[in-house]
Amino acid sequence: MTDHTTNADDFSSRVAQDPTTADPVAATVEDDGETATTTAAEPQPQKRPSMVREVIETLILALVIFVLVRAVVLNFKVDGHSMDPSFDNGEMLLVNRNAYFHFGQSALTDWLPGVNGDFYIFNPPQRGDVIVFNPPIEHNDKPYIKRIIGLPGDVVETRGGAVYVNGNKLDEPYIDGKVTNCQGQDCRPVTVPEGQVFVMGDNRTNSSDSRVFGPVPEGNIIGKAWVTYWPKDDIGVVPHYDYPSEP
């Protein structure tokens, strides 16, 4: 039974179910001799989003995911043999472009306890890291991939077919027993300037690196080699090599 209530100035109305109708939603309203019949509204089916809208939303979502992924990683193809035997020609890598993300000296880092100089979210560049960078060479727009050998303040020297850092001979099993020469340059020790790194290719006899163009500014680093995704036999995380003799 349905009640319809008016304000105090109106007269009372009564609602009675019509006993002669089989429709339970039909009712008769008697009011001052006048009769009206009301029927409950049937629920309307909900409209589904159009296919065009769904396609647009999917494309926008895909674009957002693409931008977020590209903000973190880049794909890179090894071109050449300067990193043999660690990385083959044509090998495909994912490069973590935020591996060395940091804040420079500012009012923010000055008052943070234990922070001197730049503040790195993860880790600063380390010896043994494989990096992709823009070489400090004029008229060159092709990124290089090399291994970090020396850090700011390190003294790097090549003598007797081996590499010495701060007077300590590096143990480098990844060069597969090959010797390291000066690549036509003088073999005098090089002190790595602040904010730069000294890099070399693993294929020491076929690599243009810091022995040729000098240390690389950290600002030139695109990212750290992270994952090999092609060929499928080499899929995996790029290994990091530590030098036990170095702090």
Image (spheres, rainbow, N blue to C red):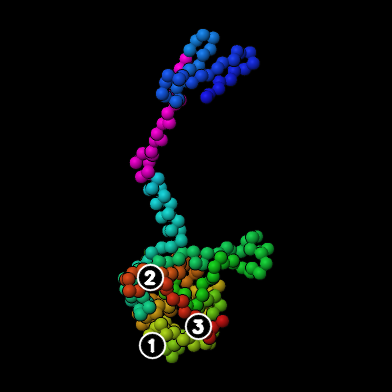
For marks 3 and 2, give the CA distance.
23 Å
- Which badge, 3 or 1, is on the more N-terminal residue? 1
Q: Residues within 10 Å of mark 3 (few under 14, many from 20)?
A: some
Indicate whether residue 130 is drawn in magenta: no
**Dividing the picture into quarters, in which one does residue 239 lie?**
bottom left
The part of the chain drawn in magenta is 36-56
**Dividing the picture into quarters, in which one does residue 51 lie?**
top left
Amino acid identity at mark 1: Gly
Residue sitting at x 52%, y 84%: 244
Q: Which mark is residue 243?
A: 3
Amino acid identity at mark 2: Thr
Q: Is residue 108 above or below residue 92?
A: above
Q: Nearer the viewer, residue 53 or 211?
A: 53
Residue 167 place in picture, x, y as percent: 53, 87
Residue sitting at x 57%, y 63%: 103
Q: Is residue 52 above or below residue 29?
A: below
Q: Does residue 209 appear left or right of residue 242 in this picture? A: left
Q: Nearer the viewer, residue 127 or 182?
A: 127
How many numbered markers are drawn?
A: 3
For marks 3 and 1, give the CA distance.
16 Å
